[in-house]
Each structure stands twice: as C-alpha cells, then as structure tokens.
C-alpha cells in the first residue's frame, strides 16, 4: 500500500455489504459509507416501489437512545417539534437547530417506553449530532444517552404490497400500526421494531433489528417478496422517490444556512410549545420579519434535466438555486426543489433554469409532485 492509499479513509460498511455485492449492486460512497446506488436500474427500482415493493438497506442511519426521568424535558429543549404529544408507540419528524435557527440535521424521535426514546439521525451526521446532543444533555440531571448505531440495522420495505409481503412473517397485526406509529414484534423469528414510516411517498415499514440479524432478515424479505415482484432498491431510487414526494434531504434542502421554516417545514416547528427550545427566538423572529428564501417545486417546460446547484432565473435576475433535481419516473416530468426569494415563490410563477449555459423555461408548481392515491 502506498502512502497515498493509506491516507484515504476506508468507507464504512453496513451488515448487508456482502449481500449487496452478491446481488451485483453498484456501490458508491455516501456520507462515508459504501452503499448500493442501484441493482437492476434506478427507474426499474423506482417503479417497483410505486407499483409493488422495494427493499432498502438503511442501516447506515444512526440510532441514539435517550432515557431517564428528564428525557422528555431534554428532548423538548433539544428540538422544535412537540415531543410531549407522543404516546408510547408513536414517532415524529423534527430537526436539530442551532440558536440561530439553522439546521444541524433532521431526525425521527420514537417514544419507546415511559422515559425512553430513540433518535434516528442521518448517517453522515452521526458523530456531529451525538456530540451536539451530548453537550446539551449535560444541562439535565437525569438523562442517559447511548449511541446504538453500530449494533442496530435498519431495513425498509416500501410500496403498496409491503404489508402483504411482511404480514405472513410478522407476529403482530400490521394493519393496526398506524402511520408514524410502531410496535415491537418478531419478523421471521427476529426481534424487530416495526415502524410504519418511510422516505418514498408510499406505504411501507421500516424494520430496526440487531445488526447480527440483518442478513437473515434481508434474505427472508427478498425471498418472501419475490412472487409479488419485490426488488432490492438503492440510493438512486430512494432519491427519485423522495424527490417526487418532496421530502427534504439534509445537505440539500436543509443545511447550516437554512432553517426549517424556509424549507417548508413550519408544521414541525411548535413556537407555542410551553417550554423553551434551542433556536426558538430566532425562528420566531424569522417568522415575524419574513423569510429570506422559500423552498419551491420546479417543473421544466422544455427538455432538460434539472440538477442540484443549477441557478434559477427570472429573466436576467438570478433569484435562487436548485437543491435537488431529476427526471421523475412516476410523474414523467423533469422536476426539482430549490430556494427562491419569497416574491418568486408563488405557484405558477414562470422562471428559467440554467442548464449547461442555456436557460430552460420552467415554472413553480405545488408540492408534492406525487401523492399516493392521486
């Protein structure tokens, strides 16, 4: 090994790395992990999730536990959403914000039991998030944190046939688990937390299990779903699916220069929460004074494929930038998400996207681009 080679940090691997290789996946670097971007092809995998089911390895995500008599008070201080409204068996979506309101990460919080919660964060932010959370936990006497990312695997089964594939393997009634709720149970004799959540815009389940059991669970789900057309799906399809559903992706729609209000996530920011939380005054001020930018949906009116980083124009005036973009396989349109100044955020506004030096006609459209059942 050369000196240059030894200086390159090795990529982390999920417990399913060998399964991805055996399936012929194309592996790429993502957030410091060696992850499958596609197997049979992005469009085929995307359509399988929309019409049948797809199976995703999401084991690179981070899982933290927060426990103790002060756990709720701590989480109420830590995030802008209202954790107090969670019953045991329920989850919510929220963000970690700085005092200035900008976003450190977005995450899910699960209410596991009395005085016990799980936080699920993005893979590239595990160390940063844990350090931030730990630093603020010190202000509370009775809260214990633990990072369980290395011992926890996460597999997502998404699509209209997800329940019919999973139910014969599970010992709980899946139709009794509501959206953004979860239940502990056995799936193929493997202890799991079965969560009715996902990142695709389809119905489906996310299964948290011990890392040592991940390969067995993955293989069992693939075999069980084969007669119904389940396909393993990679990060490429995951991205086009979440884009059509207009879900934010950290590092694109959310970052350290953007607050949740600007990203269209005002529904997760509870400014009337009865307790103080990090970033509250800044977010309150931003709401009162008016936002500097707004996240919008963009649809091209001419041929072209929009991509992250492309500039948005109104004539000769640059008014914003795309944060995500692609051809939408289900909606059959070239679509993107981006930030523009508020006066250009109205649905129907005509704009242009600069693609390789050429201005392409586009318009602001309502979000999401795709909604299940419509």
Image: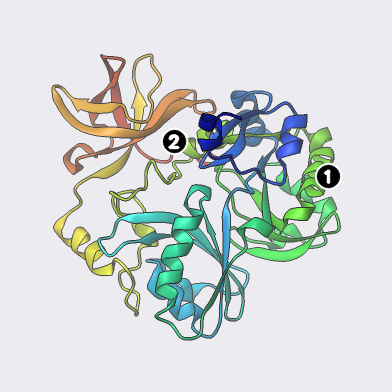
The residue sitting at 42% across, 46% down in the picture is 250
Percent x, y for residue 314?
18, 26
**Front position among marks 1 and 2:** 1
Question: Residue at label 1?
Answer: 220
Of the numbered discs 1 and 2, the one sitting upstream in the chain is: 1
| Residue 2, quarter of the rendered image | top right
Q: Please determine whether, in this image, residue 263 is positioned above or below residue 87.
A: above
| Residue 64, quarter of the rendered image | bottom right
Left or right position of 35 against 289: right
Give the position of the N terminus as an image quadrant: top right
Q: In front: 364, or 148?
A: 148
Left or right position of 156 against 259: right
Percent x, y for residue 186?
81, 61
**Which secondary structure lies at badge 1?**
helix
Is residue 323 shown to the viewer in this render?
Answer: yes
Question: Residue at label 2?
Answer: 369
Is residue 195 shown to the viewer in this render?
Answer: no
Percent x, y for residue 4?
51, 30
| Residue 62, quarter of the rendered image | bottom right
Q: Label 2 neighbourhood size at 10 Å, few (<14), some (14-19), many (20+)?
A: many
The residue sitting at 45% across, 59% down in the picture is 129
The residue sitting at 84% across, 51% down in the picture is 168
């Amino acid at each position: 090994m050369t000196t240059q080679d030894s200086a390159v940090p090795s990529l982390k691997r999920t417990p399913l790395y060998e399964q991805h290789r055996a399936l012929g996946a194309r592996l790429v670097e993502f957030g410091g992990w060696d992850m499958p971007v596609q197997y049979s092809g992005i469009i085929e995998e995307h359509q399988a999730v929309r019409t049948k089911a797809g199976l995703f390895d999401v084991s690179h995500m981070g899982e933290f536990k927060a426990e103790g008599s002060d756990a709720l008070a701590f989480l109420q201080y830590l995030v802008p959403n209202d954790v107090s409204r969670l019953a045991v068996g329920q989850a919510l979506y929220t963000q970690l914000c700085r005092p200035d309101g900008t976003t450190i990460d977005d995450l899910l919080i699960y209410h596991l039991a009395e005085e016990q919660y799980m936080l699920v964060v993005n893979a590239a932010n595990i160390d940063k998030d844990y350090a931030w959370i730990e630093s603020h936990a010190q202000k509370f006497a009775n809260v214990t944190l633990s990072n369980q990312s290395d011992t926890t695997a996460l597999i997502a089964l998404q699509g209209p046939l997800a329940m019919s594939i999973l139910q014969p393997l599970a010992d709980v009634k899946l139709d009794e688990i509501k959206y953004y709720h979860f239940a502990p149970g056995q799936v193929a004799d493997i202890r799991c937390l079965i969560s009715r959540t996902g990142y695709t815009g389809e119905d489906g389940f996310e299964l948290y299990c011990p890392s040592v059991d991940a390969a067995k669970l993955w293989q069992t789900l693939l075999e069980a779903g084969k007669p119904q057309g389940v396909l393993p799906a990679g990060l490429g399809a995951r991205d086009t699916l979440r884009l059509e559903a207009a879900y934010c992706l950290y590092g694109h729609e959310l970052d350290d220069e953007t607050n949740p209000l600007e990203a269209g996530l005002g529904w997760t920011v509870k400014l009337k929460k009865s307790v103080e939380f990090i970033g509250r005054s800044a977010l309150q001020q931003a709401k009162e004074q008016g936002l500097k930018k707004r996240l919008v949906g963009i649809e091209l009116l001419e041929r072209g494929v929009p991509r992250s980083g492309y500039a948005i124009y109104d004539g000769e005036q640059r008014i914003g930038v795309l944060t995500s973009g692609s051809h939408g396989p289900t909606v059959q349109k070239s679509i993107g998400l981006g930030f523009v100044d508020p006066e250009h955020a109205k649905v129907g506004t005509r704009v242009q996207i600069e693609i390789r030096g050429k201005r392409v006609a586009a318009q602001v459209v309502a979000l999401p681009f795709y909604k299940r059942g419509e």
